[in-house]
Image: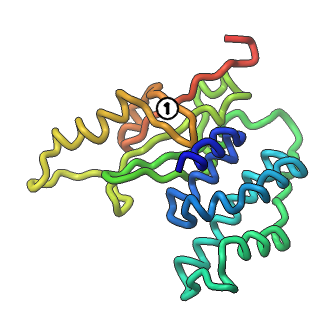
């Protein structure tokens, strides 16, 4: 675990997020992830951070299909390493078409974290409605996380007579809001919430960063 922690801490954040998402999603374990270290290093050097992060999202989709929804048991024809090779050969990033006119400031690509009673899951980036904070820091969007709280089935928390709801909220949700989140060697602190987002049990977290104007 120590070797893995040191490795992801050195990775560019958007790539480290996708590697951690693979593990949190139970698609690979730490040993299998470390087995891809050299190949990801080469990809980063030759293709860059954005390409590598996109590739890992594609790899996660293929791994979920292969390891969750088929009878493949990571044998000689279904190992993580073999799947990585197939994805490298077959995948090509989708090129975004440029549109005329000013850039769209109404949405931005946002990383998501879903916290459950027992763990948390990493997803995205997904298009998210922008707000005044995001518009103020257009070069630092990856430093912000949209964090939502759900039960293990993906549904919103509901009242249960058999559960001490107040104690649970204080222990699981309150501790995250007070102490922050540690993901792939980065620390994120609670930033803010909006009335509309609270209906979905969602809040914003942020990692400390230096903006373009030095603030």
Work out which residue is located at the far front of the displayed protein and give it: 2
Location of residue 115 with respect to 180 vertically, above or below: below
* Front position in the image: 45 or 198: 45
Crowdedness near tag 1: few (<14), some (14–19) or many (≥20) residues, C-alpha within 10 Å? many
Location of residue 24 with respect to 201 vertically, above or below: below
Q: Quadrant of residue 197?
A: top left
Left or right side of 23 for 176: left
Percent x, y for residue 133? 59, 23
Q: Residue at x 74, y 69 (%)?
A: 84
Q: To which residue does mark 1 refer?
A: 205
> Quick one: SS at disc 1?
strand
Q: Residue at x 59, y 62 (%)?
A: 31
* Front position in the image: 99 or 174: 174
Percent x, y for residue 27? 56, 67
Left or right side of 146 for 155: left
Location of residue 70 with respect to 47 vertically, above or below: below
Percent x, y for residue 215? 67, 11
Left or right side of 49 for 171: left
């Amino acid at each position: 675990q120590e070797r893995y922690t040191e490795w992801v801490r050195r990775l560019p954040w958007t790539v480290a997020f996708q590697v951690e998402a693979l593990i949190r999603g139970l698609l690979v374990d730490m040993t299998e992830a470390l087995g891809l270290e050299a190949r990801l290093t080469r990809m980063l050097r030759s293709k860059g951070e954005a390409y590598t992060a996109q590739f890992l999202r594609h790899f996660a989709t293929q791994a979920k299909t292969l390891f969750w929804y088929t009878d493949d048991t990571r044998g000689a024809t279904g190992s993580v390493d073999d799947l990585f090779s197939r994805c490298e050969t077959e995948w090509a990033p989708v090129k975004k078409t440029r549109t005329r006119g000013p850039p769209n400031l109404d949405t931005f690509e946002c990383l998501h974290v879903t916290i459950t009673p027992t763990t948390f899951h990493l997803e995205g980036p997904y298009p998210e409605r922008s707000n005044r904070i995001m518009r103020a820091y257009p070069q630092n969007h990856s430093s912000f996380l949209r964090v939502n709280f759900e039960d293990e089935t993906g549904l919103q928390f509901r009242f249960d007579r058999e559960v001490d709801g107040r104690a649970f909220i204080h222990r699981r949700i309150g501790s995250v809001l007070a102490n922050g989140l540690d993901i792939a060697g980065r620390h994120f602190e609670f930033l803010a919430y909006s009335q509309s987002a609270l209906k979905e049990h969602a809040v914003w977290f942020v990692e400390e960063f230096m903006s373009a104007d030095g603030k």
